[in-house]
Amino acid sequence: MAKGVTLRDVAELAGVSSRTVSNVVNGYAPVAEATRARVQQAVDKLGYRPNVLARNLAAGRSGQIAVVVPYLDTPYFAELLQGIIRAARVQGYNVLIDQTDGDAEHEKLFLGRGSQHLLFDGVIFSPLGLAQSDLSERDPSLPLVVLGERVSDGGFDHVGIDDVAASLEATEHLLGLGRRRVAAIGDQPYRTGEAAQLRTRGYRLAHERAGLPVREELVVSTPRFNRSDGATAMAHLLDDLEEPPDAVFCYSDLVALGALHTLASRGLRVPEDIAVVGYDDIEDGRYSNPPVTTVSPDKKVIAETAVERLLKRISSSTPVPGREIRAPHRLIPRASTIGRQAAAADGP
Amino acid sequence: MAKGVTLRDVAELAGVSSRTVSNVVNGYAPVAEATRARVQQAVDKLGYRPNVLARNLAAGRSGQIAVVVPYLDTPYFAELLQGIIRAARVQGYNVLIDQTDGDAEHEKLFLGRGSQHLLFDGVIFSPLGLAQSDLSERDPSLPLVVLGERVSDGGFDHVGIDDVAASLEATEHLLGLGRRRVAAIGDQPYRTGEAAQLRTRGYRLAHERAGLPVREELVVSTPRFNRSDGATAMAHLLDDLEEPPDAVFCYSDLVALGALHTLASRGLRVPEDIAVVGYDDIEDGRYSNPPVTTVSPDKKVIAETAVERLLKRISSSTPVPGREIRAPHRLIPRASTIGRQAAAADGP
DNA sequence: TTGAAAGCGCTAACAG
DNA sequence: CTGTTAGCGCTTTCAA
């Protein structure tokens, strides 16, 4: 029934022009109360529902934003996405999701827009395969906000936390606990590993400030930030070194969980034998055994800021200068570094 | 530059009509090779990109499907979503995500379509707040596939695993290990708890077949299937019962992880003191301490089947009869029931 | 094989 | 305050 009812049908029934119906439906302009009531009645009677496609075409915007992430099943992205969807909906925007599997070509395709022209009004992008330098090749007319830890070169915004500072704090926490062989898992010493490199910088900085040397063999690279990467790297640290570490700073909670897995299977105690710190504050880390001390980025702020900045770009007719936005973060000590008793004493 | 280039512009430059350009762009109909080349050249020169909005309006379809889930940050949904997005993309469809937070009103809104009219061509829906009976009020013209464990009453498809059988297997696994006080965490004895109730049925069936009585105090209800639900329920089983259970069947892996968390903080050993089984086979469960024995639904099959059925509905002009589709599942024994040694001996 | 032209359903100048 | 009307850019029927 409700199929194919158009604005015109309503207008006819109500005895007004389609312009007026449009105004009523969209709550635009002042419409006489009497007219409005009549129109509303016709709308209800006919079961009219506006055709979003037509509206978008006429308005020249889609009311959709795209969020491009490497992996959806990574808890960190899933949690972030949740916040982005909420924030976007409040503003009347729908969210289109795409996952790139970290593939550089796929990521590029999205930024070039290509066949998707006008399907979304802007993009929130979390790069993995693409390096900073690749971003400059993008379609400059496409409003863009980049998530993560790259440094922007203008033309788009960039929302993240201060990775160097956060990593510094995490490492200092470990050092402050008296650990002296602190390993780092997750470095990525190649072109697209900018985020990882910032964390390594913080790790080194902490040693520097403490007047301690960095033992290079304790800095382990991983291809990704997954559980399996953490498990493998931890095994390496345990098996191939003269002297094992007494603490590890992991560049993601997943890596930390993987490390924990290896430690458990080796019968090592955490934190007594080895203390573990993660990064991201995903929910898994709160319920793991033991719960994981972690760097907690304020995901809500990140999500909301990203959406807000993107919408600002979309609605602005003049080019908006690119901005670096630092969301807050904090270190949350849990049992994996301070032990169960201490952690329990600290409250829930 | 590439902004605002229309089909007409291309047609003009190539000296043909827009009809022909359209044919070339879409690869439709036979176009003379000479014409095609000339048009292609004009397209390239002008940097023409089709306006998806206009195309959709004219074609009367959006090329998008919506996926509606209660929570995006639930690993099970995130993993499923990943598969759905992949499958949809292969078919040229984009995926619009919405999360309902389990709110019945929100879920209804989506099924009624309302202001979203024509924004998506169909919906894959995972209900939480809505009961089976609510689904019949939906807009019948909207192609729909429902995920999860409800029983369909026609008009839409339904993709899930056989919950009763899976729960039966899980419980029998525990019983077969000689456990005699097997608890169940996750029952939802109210209208919208249909999925949970099927699992409880399997749990009871296992006892029945083994000639064992079900101790009602061991069947614990939870509002959700979250970690915190599992943690709380486990604490209850430990604290408020005369005799604690020696095994628990949890209705989700998250619940199992929560239970594990409580057990660890109480200093109880898994599986020696209490064996634990989960449900969903999320990645967290593979890396937890100990790894969790679980019911593993074939998520890939579920995702692909759901997309396939939905697209079939979308493209079919005549009504497609509703179908119940059972995806495969299997029980994966891990250390949380069979112990570390046995689990390790089983392979990776 | 290709052109001309009529919409798809809505928005928004431009009158009145 | 409301009607008229010209598009938005593409698809597609009907002719040629």
Image: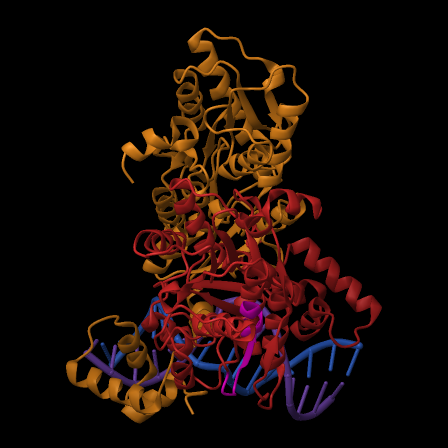
Chain colours: A orange, B red, C blue, D purple
- What percent of the width, then of the height, locates residue B229? 36, 56
Q: Nearer the viewer, residue A84 or B196?
A: B196
Range shown magenta = B152-168
Residue B335 in view of the camera: yes
Q: Is residue B294 magenta?
A: no
Q: Nearer the viewer, residue B117 or B146?
A: B146
At x 41%, y 52%, the residue is: B227
Q: Relative to residue B237, is residue A140 drawn left or right?
A: right
Quarter of the image for residue B39 reads bottom right
Q: Relative to residue A176, is residue A220 drawn left or right?
A: right
- What percent of the width, then of the height, locates residue A219? 59, 21
Q: Is residue B162 magenta?
A: yes
Which quarter of the rendering shows the C terminus of chain B? Answer: top right
Quarter of the image for residue B100 reads bottom left
Residue B348 in view of the camera: no
**Residue sitting at the far top:** A211
**Against B103, is A302 above or below?**
above
- What percent of the width, then of the height, locates residue B337? 56, 52
At x 55%, y 70%, the residue is: B168
Q: Nearer the viewer, residue A66 or B85?
A: B85
**Against B348, is B21 above or below?**
below
Q: Nearer the viewer, residue A181 or B332?
A: B332
